Amino acid sequence: MKISELSVLAITLLSVGNLLAQAPAAAPGAAAPKIQFEAVTFDFGRLSSGQSARHDFIFTNAGTSVLEITGVRPSCGCTTAGEWSKTVEPGKTGTISLQFNSAGFSGMVVKTATVTCNDPATPSLTLQLSGNVWKEIDAIPQFAVLNGTSESLADAKATIKIVNNGDKPLDILGLEGNNAMFVGDLKTNQPGKEFELFVKVVPPLNPTMMHGVFTLKTTSTNVPQVQVTAMLMLQPVIAVTPPQITLPPPPVNNGFVHTVNIRNSSTNAVKLSEPVVSDSRIAATMKETEAGKVFNLDVNIPQGFEAKAGANIEVVVKTTHPQFPELKIPITQPLPPPPTGVASPVPPGAGAHAH
């Protein structure tokens, strides 16, 4: 570099240095709000079922500009947000009110709510309510869910514990049900403290009413009756999952195997055989993974497969079950996408305009 060039560079650097020296110093930090809570958790202790617990969470704006609370979102419908301080000046305090409704709950519960604000360091945080919901008389579980099939209703049964959490001994004076399909039998485990309700299903079934309610009359002044809901969940005798095979639109770039699970829930073992596909390009094989109970049907889709227009493709499997001699699993494939740059056909009259 020549001497003249060095001189020009030195003068330029000196000028830049002078400009920087004359510029005002940068502010140490821009004004911003800062949210600080006295506590983000509250334990409401023991709460009788059906009562509500309310708490005001107190916070301070420890920042240098106005704090804005933009939202309070509880995690579920049992917890609601009351009034809260929308804007809080620096150095001032605000409150956020949360209320928990214990109806339908028992035992330890934890409920939360998400608070959002304009604090750049803490744009969101979580508040928590917790405690123990107490029931004088508790049904565990709250619902009697009975699982079975039309063949094995004897397996459809459930047991509910009735527990007296109160100080006084409890007696159950009577048991009534509103659906003859469900039969209940009451047993005393600990006199005055714990009982068991055995629920079973007896034919004939009522397909229009697959649930019922048992009412237990008690000697409790506060809880004169306890209700237990029974529900029958009928499972298919032979379940096919998934019930149909849906292929990707053509062309199928790579061949693949689609597995269908077949489960036998009947009382007797069954045999499955002779899987046949109505389209000869598709092969199917059967594997028994649990003797007489669980099977895997492997359906082999070849590369480039495209269903013929209007074709009805299905896999048919023979079974030894007298009520279900055949299982049929449909195979569907959506239409191929239109070629690039080709407009979809316009229905007749779509371009007409009323005059």
Image: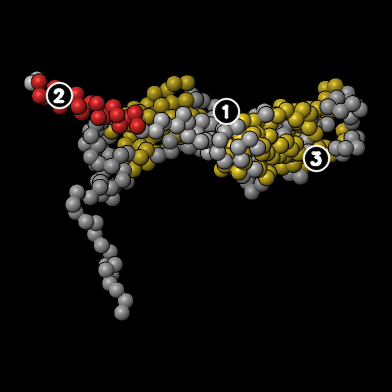
Q: Closest to the observer: 57 or 345? A: 57
Q: Which residue is mark 1?
A: 267
Mark 1 nearby-residue class (10 Å; few <14, some 14–19, many ≥20)? few
Residue 341: % across, % down: 18, 52
Quadrant of the snapshot with the C terminus: bottom left
Report which residue position mark 3 lands on: 215
Q: Is residue 54 left or right of residue 235?
A: right
Q: Residues within 10 Å of mark 3 (few under 14, many from 20)?
A: some
Q: Which numbered disc, 1 or 2, marks the residue that appears first in the sequence?
A: 2
Identify the secondary structure beneath mark 2.
Answer: helix
**Which of pointers 1 and 3 indicates the residue nearer the eye?**
3
Give the CA separation, mark 3 to mark 2: 102 Å
The front one of 154 and 210 is 210
> For numbered disc 3, what is the local secondary structure?
strand
Side of 3 where 25 appears, left or right:
right
Depth check: 205 or 268 in front? 205
Amino acid on which the number 1 mark rests in the picture: Thr
Within-10-Å neighbours for mark 2: few <14, some 14–19, many 20+: few
Distance of mark 1 from mark 3, alpha carbons?
33 Å
Mark closest to the chain's N terminus, 1 or 3: 3
- Residue carrying label 2: 7
Residue 112 % position (x, y): 63, 33
Which image quarter is the N terminus in?
top left
